[in-house]
């Protein structure tokens, strides 16, 4: 069963959120050798990608591989370029040539008053 993770943020500050990938019973999943990618689309079936977060572009950082810790990072200037609204998103893990979905959900961007 794939988890549902809905993310909300605003465009007036960097977005940084740490996660622990773990089993239902709370045991961390080792991320050694893993790469991640997440794509935001206005609708899941759209061909156009509004934003891409990957370990390669630095928007997903593995903080502690053995203990399953990673972080999503989006700088304010990137959030300001994204149109406010709700996007479909999913996080995919690649390791040893295999891909698996970690979660799916929404990414909601509001207009921050301090921008």
Image (spheres, helix red, strand yellow):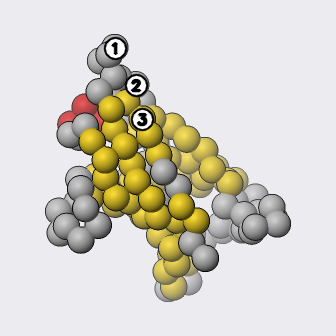
Q: Name the residue at 24% across, 56% down.
A: 42
| Callout 2: SS | loop
Question: Any mark on residue 9, and which?
Answer: 3
| Callout 1: SS | loop
Q: Residues within 10 Å of mark 3 (few under 14, many from 20)?
A: some
Query: Percent position (x, y) of residue 6?
Result: 48, 51
Which of 57/48 is in front?
A: 48
Q: Is residue 100 above or below residue 23?
A: below
Locate residue 109: give its quadrant: top left
Q: What residue is shown with label 2?
A: 13
Locate residue 8: give its quadrant: top left
Quarter the C terminus occupies: top left
Q: Name the residue at 53% across, 51% down.
A: 61
Q: Residues within 10 Å of mark 2 (few under 14, many from 20)?
A: some
Query: Percent position (x, y) of residue 114?
Result: 34, 14
Can residue 103 be seen in the rendering of this structure?
yes
Position of 66 with respect to 37 (left or right) is right
Q: Name the residue at 25% across, 37% down.
A: 84
Q: For marks 1 and 3, give the CA distance.
A: 13 Å
Locate residue 31: give its quadrant: bottom right
Q: Nearer the viewer, mark 3 or mark 2?
A: 3
Q: For marks 1 and 2, give the CA distance.
A: 8 Å
Quarter the N terminus occupies: bottom right
Q: What residue is shown with label 1?
A: 114
Query: Percent position (x, y) of residue 4?
Result: 53, 61
Position of 10 with respect to 33 (left or right) is left
Total marks shown come to 3
Q: Pointers 1 and 3 in contact (CB under 8 A)?
A: no
| Mark with earlier residue (1, 3) | 3
Q: Pointers 1 and 2 in contact (CB under 8 A)?
A: yes
């Amino acid at each position: 069963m794939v988890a549902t993770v809905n993310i909300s943020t605003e465009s007036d500050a960097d977005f940084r959120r740490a996660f622990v990938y773990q089993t239902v019973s709370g045991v961390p999943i080792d991320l050694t050798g893993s790469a991640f990618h997440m794509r935001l689309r206005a609708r899941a079936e759209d061909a156009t990608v509004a934003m891409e977060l990957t370990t390669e572009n630095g928007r997903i950082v593995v903080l502690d591989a053995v203990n399953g810790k990673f972080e999503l990072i989006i700088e304010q200037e990137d959030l300001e370029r994204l149109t406010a609204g709700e996007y479909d998103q999913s996080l995919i893990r690649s390791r040893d040539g295999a891909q698996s979905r970690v979660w799916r959900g929404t990414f909601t961007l509001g207009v921050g008053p301090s921008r």
